[in-house]
Amino acid sequence: MGIVSPGFHGRRRKSAAELPPGQYLTNDFPVLSAGPTPRMREDDWEFTVTTETGREHRWTWREFLDLPAETPTVDIHCVTKWSKLATEWEGVSLDALLADVETEADFALVHSYGGYTTNLPLADLVEGQAWIVHRYNGEELAPEHGGPARLLVPHLYFWKSAKWVHGIRLLTDDEPGFWESAGYHDYGDPWREQRYQGD
Amino acid sequence: MTARDTGTGYVDGNALAGPLGELFALVAMDVTAATGRCVNCGRTGPVAALAVYDRAPGMVARCPGCDHVMLRLVRTPDAAWLDLSGMVWLRVTTER
Ligand SMILES: [Zn+2]
C-alpha cells in the first residue's frame, strides 16, 4: 500500500494501477465452481481444526456464531483475472478460531463440504489476514458463493478462499489442494502474479 | 527416438509418441468414441455424458453417477495439465 491521503484514495480506487498485474475490475460477483453446490443446513454444519498430532477442535454453527464477529472490507482477486474492490463481509477471524489450538505446524490444508481442498502456509491464516465468513453485503452468504460459510483470505488468489468450508488440517509438510495439484501455484500471491506452478 | 537397452527389457518413453498421438487424435476427432470407468463407483460410460464444470480455474469432469472427479484439465499459457486419476481406464474405439 502506498501512502495516499484518504481523499485521493477514494477517487483513485478504481484505477488499473491499484489492481494486481493482469487483473481487470468487475462490479458483479462471478460464480466459479468445480462441482455441484453443496446444500448444507446450518444445524448440520460443523467446523473442525485438526492439528498435526490429531487433536480435533470443533464448532457447531451456534458455537461459531458465539465467537466475536468482525466485518472486513477487502479487495478480492480471482485467478481467472477479475478483481472486485471493497467487498463487505462478516465472520470470525482465524485468530479467534485458532486461539486455543496448540500446534507446531507450518502448513494448512483447508477442506470443504463437497470435497474441495486448498493449501496455504498457516502464517497466512493468522494475524488478521483470514476469516470464516457467513455474511456478504449485509446478507446471509448465498450457497453459490459458499454459504453457509466460506474461508476469506483476500491477500491470495480467491481459489484459496474455499467455499463451503468444513475444516482445516494443520500439517508439518505442505500438501497440495485441488487446483494446486493440477498446475496452479502453491502460494498464489496476486501481486506477484503467482497463477501457475513455476510462476 | 526410442532407445532400447537390451539389459533392462524395456524401451524408453519415446515409444509412446505414436500410440499416444493416435489416441489424442481420435479423442479430438470424436470425443463420443471415448468411454471411461469411474475410480470411485465403477460406473462406465461415455466421456460425453460426464458433468463438466467449466466456470472454474480449469475444466472439471465429474461422474454422472457419484459426482467423483474423473478428469481435470488445466490450461496455462505454456502447458496443459491432464489429470485422469479419477478414471480406472479410458477406452477409445479405433476403426477396424
Ligand atoms: Zn462414480
Image (spheres, coloured by chain):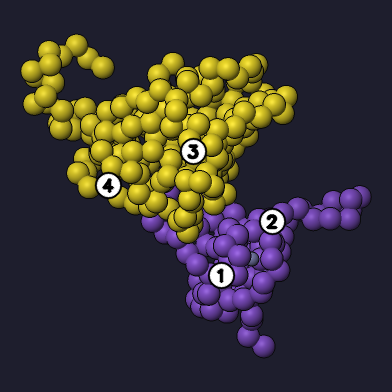
Instruction: State yes or no: Cβ of the residue under disc 1 lies below 8 Å from any atom of ligand 1.
Output: yes
Residue holding disc 2:
B14
Q: Real-space Cα distance between discs 2 and 4?
A: 46 Å
Label 3 near label 1: C-beta < 8 Å? no
The percent coordinates of residue B24 (x first, y second) are 57, 67
Residue that mark 4 sits on: A29
State whether discs 3 and 2 lie on one chain. Answer: no
Residue kind at label 3, given as amino acid type: Trp
Of the two numbered discs 2 and 4 in the rendering, the one whose residue sits closer to the viewer: 4
Q: Chain of mark 1?
A: B
| Mark 3 lies within 8 Å of ligand 1 (Cβ measured) | no
Which chain is disc 2 placed on?
A: B
The residue depicted at 64 percent of the width and 70 percent of the height is B36
Question: Marks 3/4: CA distance?
Answer: 26 Å
Residue count near mark 2 (Cα–Cα under 10 Å), binned few <14, some 14–19, many ≥20: few
The residue lying at 31 percent from left, 26 percent from top is A72
For disc 3, the chain is A
Question: Label for residue A61?
Answer: 3
SS for dot 3: helix
Q: Which residue is mark 1?
A: B64
